[in-house]
Amino acid sequence: MNPDSSGSLEKQVGELLWRVRRLEEALWRQGVLSKEFLQQTPAVGAPLAQVVAPAVSTAAGAEQKSNAPVRGAVPAPATSLPEKPLTMPVAAPVFSSYAANGKTDDRSLENRIGSQWFNRIGILAMLIAAAWFLKLAMDNHWIGPLGRVLIGLVAGAGLIAWSERFRSRGFAGFSYSLKAVGSGTLYLSLWAAFSLYQLMPSSAAFAAMIVVTAFNGLMAWRQDAELLALYAIAGGLSTPLLISTGENHEIALLSYLLLLDLAVLVLVALKPWSRLLFVSFVGTALLFGAWASAYYTNDQLGRTTFFLSCFFLCFAFAPRLVRVDLEDGAAHSAGDNLALVLLPVANAALGFIAYYSMYSWMKSGWVGAWLAVGFASFYLLLNSLPAQSKLRASTPLLSALHLTAAVVFLTIAIPLKAQGHWLTIGWLVEGGALMWVAARLGRKLLRALALGCLALGFLALVANSDASTTPFFNARFGCYCVGIAVFAFAAWIASTENRGETGAQGSWPAIAAGCVLTLNALILIAVGGEIHSYWWVRSWTVDATKWQQYQMNAQFTYSAWFMVFGAALLAAGFWRRSAFLRWQALLLLAVTIGKVFLLDMSQLSQGFRILSFLGLGALLLAVSFVYQRDWLKLRAGSADHEA
């Protein structure tokens, strides 16, 4: 590095230190920094070698004395600092709040009151005075209908033109407020010309309002002002209400809304103005809902379906177009969250409700189910689209929402079509299929959705209380068999995924254990339910003497089944070397012991009582013998495999 470049670097560093010093002094005057902190920093007029001498000398290969003057040093300001900060106590919190938001505002409370509050109150006072003057002129017939409309149009246009003068001088907020007042005056004047005085047809008023909306949109684009764009969207959505004649103009209304939504899509794709998208969606949904509740008939099904599809697709793809210029790790703004989270959910829900309401007059049971399947297929397709660039919406978030929507619609489709046992089987099969897909794709969200479907199927299964005189060969037991097979499949998938995987995959062992526990519970409940149905149905077809005998048969059969299943679980635990299975068997045997000693002793006949205790005793002795022989070397600390 030559000496000239070294001097240039020193000069730049000196200028930067001087600017930092000025910022510190401003912060000190506002009461944010203390005088002690300010005195700790080197003075701006001090030689820069005290700060940058080591780096400069290394780069230049020459030694410099620490007290030698350095070329490019910036002299200190001539003014000295006062002894106390020159600020009002109430101004410090305000300044701190601006600093916390990355902004600086050295205006005092007096300045804000004079520049902002009085400004808004003054605008309001001017509008009230103008409205009263116009009312006085109208009451006294000083101004005719045409004159009133012309005054409104001229006043609105004048306010918009006047606002540009303030914007050019740096008063952007004041300029936008004047534009809002001027645009509102133009809309109201056009509405009065059409609705109150019939000075122009509805088509002319509609076209004029579109021109005002387009002009506001153009101004927002050129001035890079999201607030103006919001004004334009609000005005555009209010236009159909202002020129409404109380008649059904479906094509004109819905075409206008569709064009407005497409214009918003263009804006949010080019500018980071995500709030526009949500405002447009809310306005479109309200206007479409209001029109449909008042004018829709089945004769309009075809064209209404077309427009509804256009709106749905527009807002379904819109979140992928949202421009979010964020640094890595930064959080989304509130507007981005509305566009990326709430809008996709609301669009899916309202779209499905609208379609279902339109086709509900069809009595065929397949309409709702296939409609839900169609929505699920659409969101699966949307989820498979390529990822967007970093400037676009958060792809993982949208992918999770689209995937969730697909699963939810599939889950809804089952009760819309299936009933009874088929409903339960549908949820169980869906849960098993989702578990398999989650394991193949490694998606935690799919895993959670699969568990939700399995939980729905399990609840529907155990809530079914149908009884049959034919044991085991009936619909309820067949449904239980499907549930047992599905949970066995899910347990196998979870145990397979768990092998050799740790850390982020740590939930698979818990899923495997839960599925095995549910599987054993279903086996126990399924056979127990068949025992109950068999003896309960027969007990109502005989006299009182045989009824009591059937009740004793049922109690003895329960105990026998618990013993057999407990022994089978214990044998499986020893075979698989699974402590988890063995503990389930021991718990079931403990329940059986309590039942035999508390219920069977008091309710069974002498013969059944002997058989019940004899069987329980033999089983417990066999279990005790197995544990005493320690075939699995449990006392030696041999590790068991978990389920």
Image (cartoon, rainbow, N blue to C red):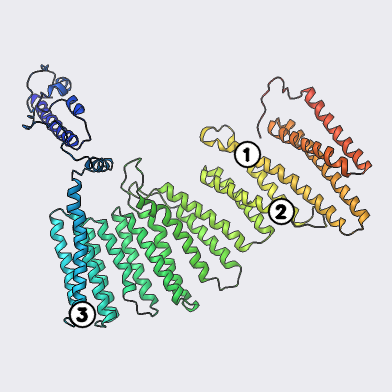
Q: Position of residue 296 (x, y in %)?
A: 46, 76
Q: Is residue 21 visible?
A: yes
Q: Is residue 598 above or below residue 275?
A: above
Q: Is residue 384 above or below residue 287?
A: above
Residue linked to disc 3: 138
Mark sitting earlier along the chain (1/2)? 2
Which of these two is toward me, 538 or 314?
538
Q: Is residue 443 visible?
A: no
Residue linked to disc 1: 512
Residue occupying image coordinates x 38% and y 75%: 251
Q: Position of residue 339 (x, y in %)?
A: 38, 54
Residue occupying image coordinates x 44% and y 76%: 294
- Report how far apart the C-alphas of labels 3 and 2 lie in the structure: 79 Å
Which of these two is toward me, 25 or 161?
25
- Label 2 element class: helix
Q: Amino acid at mark 3?
A: Met
Q: Position of residue 594 (x, y in %)?
A: 80, 37
Whether residue 286 sits left or right of residue 79 in the image: it is right
Q: Position of residue 151 (x, y in %)?
A: 17, 75
- Label 3 element class: helix
Which of these two is toward me, 364 or 121?
121
Quarter of the rendering occupied by the N terminus: top left
Q: Amino acid at mark 2?
A: Cys
Whether residue 291 sits left or right of residue 428 in the image: it is left
- Report how far apart the C-alphas of labels 1 and 2 lie in the structure: 22 Å
Badge nearest the viewer, 3 or 2: 3
Question: Which of the numbered marks, if any, corresponds to residue 479?
Answer: 2
Question: How many other residues sit within 10 Å of disc 2, few (<14), some (14-19) or many (≥20)?
Answer: some
Q: Amino acid at mark 1?
A: Ala
